[in-house]
Image: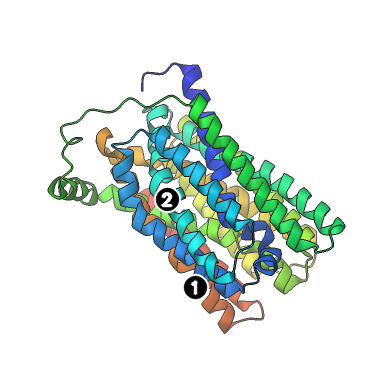
Amino acid sequence: MSLNTFQRYRSLAILTAAAGAIYPMLYLRQNFEVPLLEALGISLAALNQASSWLGTVFLLSYVPSGWLADRVDPKTLIVSSLTGTALIGWYFGQLPQPEHIKWLFAAWGLTTGLTFWSALIKEVNELAGHDQQGKFFGILEGGRGLVEALLATCAVAIFIHIAKTQTLGSIEAMRSVIDFYTTFVLLMAALTWVLVPATPKIQSPNNDKLTPAQLQRDLRLIALNPKIWWVIVCILTGYQFLWASYSFSGYLQSHWGVGASIAASITLAKLWTRPVGAILSGVLGDRFKVTVVLHWSFVGAALTLFTFALAPLTSNAIALTFIVAVGFCTYSVRGLYWAVLEECSIPRHLNGLAIGFISLVAFTPEIYLPRLNTVLLTWWPDGGGYTAYFIWVAAGGLLGAYAVKKL
């Protein structure tokens, strides 16, 4: 990409902020699970079903998303995604009928999956060049985490203030939180349109051959690369840690008697570990070796989550300590797992398609983890369901640590 250093980092900063703004509405349960259920008038099982619909649309969108990212200017795709996500968020903020919720999540799957994800990853990969993958992806993950933490801090403050002052309490507070996120996403759409330059098209003999046969050949080239599958294992098991963290708030409230505001504040602290963990791991990955740092990040995440699942939480301070430790290790993993794409030696003109193919399999936790969560909590409603859920994810982390060694 023929941009100077300032343009590259300015583009990275805007893309990072956009990535940090677009997803929080989809995962408000991370900090507001119980009040969100109350405001929408739905059960946890219904929210899990909606999340599973989101994951299904993601699954169906990833390969087409990669194909689009190889042929359409990523800036256009990203701006369209931000705008569409904000419009859906506006309707979500009206607290629609419960039967509409799953359709809204499915629509979000298109605006944040089909037109956004592969375009974002490919753009950052191009901005980084060959020798700064760890740093750029660490900044992307850590920076979007910083944005999410800042937004969540504001959202929690808004929620606490309005819940105390409004007659309808948490329902009006939840509506205000959604409106806050919607407004910020629209702002990022405008900034991206103005400040991020168009990406020069990468020429290749295949770019203009849009036949199914050519797509099949390209996918075969990617699928037969054995390192692609180890990257898939890394990302899948790493992504499970993020999904586990979405249940921390509900775990604290449902089984440890922590109030909604305190639970939101504790899980908010976890978000602040994201910029530290991701950026630090990215810098260390480029200084030493990405695979070495990623391996030990997986080991740390697995051990801390396993301990959190089994340890008695006798105080808020202990809960905070465990959640911060799990968060730091989780975001260290997330800061590096896309950087190992460079180990696969994929032709540049197929980077988008490779990202889509990897995402197709690696992000399936979006589909099965919400349903697994529902099943385990039904079997063991007294807290054992959460314990089993967290142990499952921790065991997957050890598999991820092994996969890194194969790259």
Residue at coordinates 59% horizontally, 76% vertically from top-left? 385
Indicate the amino acid at tag 1: Leu
The correct choice, above or below, for 392 with respect to 318 in the image is: below
Indicate the amino acid at tag 2: Gly
The correct choice, above or below, for 343 with respect to 191 in the image is: below
Q: Which mark is residue 372?
A: 1
Q: Which mark is residue 179?
A: none
Answer with left or right where residue 351 lies relative to residue 154. left
Q: Quadrant of the N terminus?
A: top left
**Residue 84's spot in the image, x, y percent?**
49, 46
**Residue 121's spot in the image, x, y percent?**
41, 39
**Residue reaching furthest to the bottom:** 379
The local crowd at label 2, few if under 14, some if 14 to 19, many if 20 or more residues have their Cα within 10 Å, is: many
Residue 392 seen from this side:
no
**Residue reaching furthest to the right:** 165
The local crowd at label 1, few if under 14, some if 14 to 19, many if 20 or more residues have their Cα within 10 Å, is: some
Q: Which coloring applies here?
A: rainbow
Q: Earlier in the sequence, mark 2 or mark 1?
A: 2
**Residue reaching furthest to the top:** 4
The secondary element bearing badge 1 is classed as: helix
The correct choice, above or below, for 301 with respect to 69 in the image is: below
